[in-house]
Every structure is written in structure tokens, then in C-alpha cells.
Image (cartoon, rainbow, N blue to C red):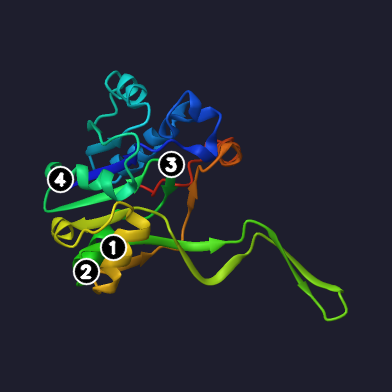
Amino acid sequence: MKVVILSGGKGIRAFPFTEYLPKPMLPLGGSPIVAHVINSFIRQGYNEFILAAGYRKAELEDYFYKKDLGAKIDIVNTGEETDTGGRVMACKDLVGDKFMVTYADGLCDVPLDKLVAFHDQNKGVGTITSVPMYSPYGVLDVADDGRVLNFREKPRIKGTWINAGYIVFDKTVFDHWQGENLEKEVFPNLLEKGLAYTYRHDGFFKSADNYKDILEFEELMQDGALPWLVKEKS
């Protein structure tokens, strides 16, 4: 099964670093974050990747055409201004009957065999991995008189799940594809038709939206841990 990795955005929130590098090439522990994404798939048996590139595509080519990760990696120019849905559509003729799509800046320890099995059992054409949402801020529980009863640092928001990427699609999804934005148009159209499902994963997920996130990743990796990797089966 091929994996399409959305790799063409300008990464405005990571500016000024993305003025010189495409966001997928931001370094994380000595390697581009997109290389970590690819390696997380390779570890679970996937070895064919399509990088849906655009902004600063040459930097991706320079790295991946020289670096052997033990996988087949094709880099497709999907345009600098193309939105997420348009990038996937541009890869339509390169994928098989079933394929995956994910982001170049998000790492998650979702077990892909269970994700695919869930997708195969439901009646949809698209299954998106969701993870619990955590507040980016400390939360106060306060009494009526203003006395602080409890302080919770970045707690989990009960019952709220967010998009982690790691999406499985049947190729028949293109029969229902509407719009240029995957999140705001394509998926809302699928859910209106009852064709979108989610695999809920209560595990590790983190994305590199800005430089602060990169620093947090680096802190996680200080002892050599890579918490987004699924443990290999013994």
C-alpha cells in the first residue's frame, strides 16, 4: 500500500525557518521530520511513498535522492499554492486501490495494521486517525468566590478528538472528491454521505507546527527515546 505524504505547504507558522527550508525538512534529532514520518511507516512494513511536494521541492529532492532509507520514494510536484485536497488528487493516478495519506509534520504511534483492519471493516471510503485533544494551557477549577480549587496543566479534554492524519482511503474516494481542502471540504462532504469514519487512538501524537514544537520534540528525544514508534513485534 502506498503512502502519500503531504509535503508541499509553506509552513507559515514555522517562519522564518521555512523561508529557507520546506517545513518537512525542519531538523529533528539530526534528520528531517518527514524522514522520521517515513521511518515510522517503514518500521511497520510500508516501503512505497509519494511526497506530494510544492514549496521548495528541490530541497526534498536533494535529500531523498541522495539518502537511502530502504524504501521507494517518489517526489511529485503538486504546485506551490495547491491545497491539501488538491495535492492528494494530483497523486490519484499513482496510488493503488487502497492507500494512505498523512502529514509531513505529525508523528503518531498508531498501529497501522489495526487502523487498516478497522477501515476494511467499516462501510466508508476514508478512515482518519483521531487522538485525544489536550489543552495547550493550564486549566483552573475556580469556586464562585474566585478561590482556585484545582490547577491542571494541559489536561485532556474529555470527549474531544482531533485529526492526527494517518488516513486510509479506498481509491473509490475520488468518485466523491469535492473541493481543494482535505479538512474543510473533502472530509465534510464524505461525512455528509456517511462515508467517513475515524479510528480512535489513545496514544502518542505530536505535530511540529512551530519552532516551540521542535524544541519539545528535541526534549523528548534527549534520552534516545522515539515515543512515536510502535514497538516491533517479537
Whether residue 202 sits left or right of residue 218 in the image: it is: left
In x, y percent, where is residue 145? 88, 79
Tag of residue 124: 2
| 4 or 2: tag closer to the N-terminus | 4
Q: Find out whether the residues at labels 1 and 4 contact each other: C-beta distance under 8 Å.
A: no
Looking at the rendered structure, the secondary structure element under dot 4 is loop
Q: Find out whether the residues at labels 2 and 3 contact each other: C-beta distance under 8 Å.
A: no
| 1 or 4: tag closer to the N-terminus | 4
Q: Nearer the viewer, residue 38 or 75?
A: 75
- The residue indicated by pointer 1 is 127
Give the total number of marks visible in the rendering: 4
Q: Whole-Å distance between the Cαs marked 4 and 2?
A: 18 Å
Give the residue at x 39% y 35%.
34
How many residues crowd mark 2 within 10 Å: few (<14), some (14–19), many (20+)?
many
Whether residue 188 sits left or right of residue 170 in the image: it is: right
Quarter-of-image position of residue 172: bottom left
Question: Would you place residue 30 above or below residue 231 in this image?
Answer: above
| 2 or 3: tag closer to the N-terminus | 3
- The residue indicated by pointer 4 is 95
Mark 4 belongs to which amino acid?
Answer: Val
Give the residue at x 50% y 69%.
160
Whether residue 30 sits left or right of residue 1 in the image: it is: right
Whether residue 103 sits left or right of residue 141 in the image: it is: left
Looking at the rendered structure, the secondary structure element under dot 1 is strand
